[in-house]
Image (cartoon, rainbow, N blue to C red):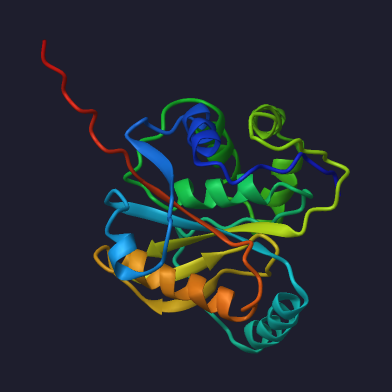
Amino acid sequence: MSAWTPLESNPDVLTKYIHNFGVNKDWIITDVMGLEPDMLEWIPKPVKSVILLFPCSESYEKHRAEEQKRLIATEETYPKDLYYMRQLTENACGTVALIHSVANNKDIMLGDGILKNFLELTKDMTPEERGKALETDKAVHENHQALAHEGQTVSDPNQRVYHHFIAFVNKKGILYELDGRKMCPVKHGATSDGTFLQDAARVCEEFMARDPKELRFTVLALSRALPSRLSFQ
């Protein structure tokens, strides 16, 4: 497995990343400062994806192993247009989460460029084949590396990373957790355009509840940018 330089959970950097990908500048990555209902009201709407960065603690890995047993025993079905890929590249979880976020929202305008080319290349591939394609995609890799060095911390591709990015999306009224380290998407029940942010926040709180003494969680949202204020002279 090759190693990329880890991305920082910096909304300005990640916004620049998706714009470099070809995402219309009407869309941004923004911080979610709190998961309480009144705090969620501050997030620009609509929200198309929630991205969680969390520590891969011992309790989380135990939960993941138990969850995998359940997923193996359950024959889940998924929408044909649910885009899911495995993460086969170390430290690429930020890029995988951003791809999951954009690829599963068809109303986000995507111009010609890096991501549109990658999605077209991989549209008929299996999740594993998509992960392998990411490893060898020079344009995606170069974009990732360039933005990984724009954060506030010094990143080292050889340094072990204990945090992991995943994405939550609403697909056909179901809340999906998309984690490239898992064997398949994880369903978290019904949702809607109107309740998606609250429903995703609830699942984020479940992650936090498994590590009540851990404070290193970050929640971000892919949302519409607020319109610029008009100035009059």
Identify the residue at image location x=52%, y=55%. 83
For the point 58% across and 84% down, which residue is it? 75
Against 75, is 97 above or below? above
Q: Nearer the viewer, residue 121 or 56?
A: 56
Residue 230 lies left or right of residue 210; in this view the side is left
The x, y position of residue 129, in whole percent, is 70, 52
Residue that lies at the very extreme toward the top in this rendered image: 233
Please indicate, yes or no, whether residue 52 appears anywhere in the rendered image.
yes
Could you say where residue 165 lies in the image, as x and y percent from the top left?
Answer: 62, 56
Residue 110: image x %, image y %?
A: 41, 34
Q: Position of residue 36 (x, y in %)?
A: 36, 69
Check the image and report above or below for 104 versus 77. Answer: above
At x 70%, y 76%, the residue is 60
Pick out the residue farthest to the left.
Answer: 232
Looking at the figure, which quarter contains the C terminus?
top left
Q: Quadrant of residue 182?
A: bottom right
Q: Is residue 172 visible?
A: no
State whether residue 213 is above or below residue 90. Answer: below
Q: Nearer the viewer, residue 129 or 13?
A: 13
Which residue sits at x=53%, y=78%?
206
Q: How many marks?
A: 0
Q: Considering depth in this image, is 86 or 145 the residue closer to the camera?
A: 145
222 sits to left or right of 37: right
Taking the image as shown, residue 71 lies to the left or right of residue 206, namely right
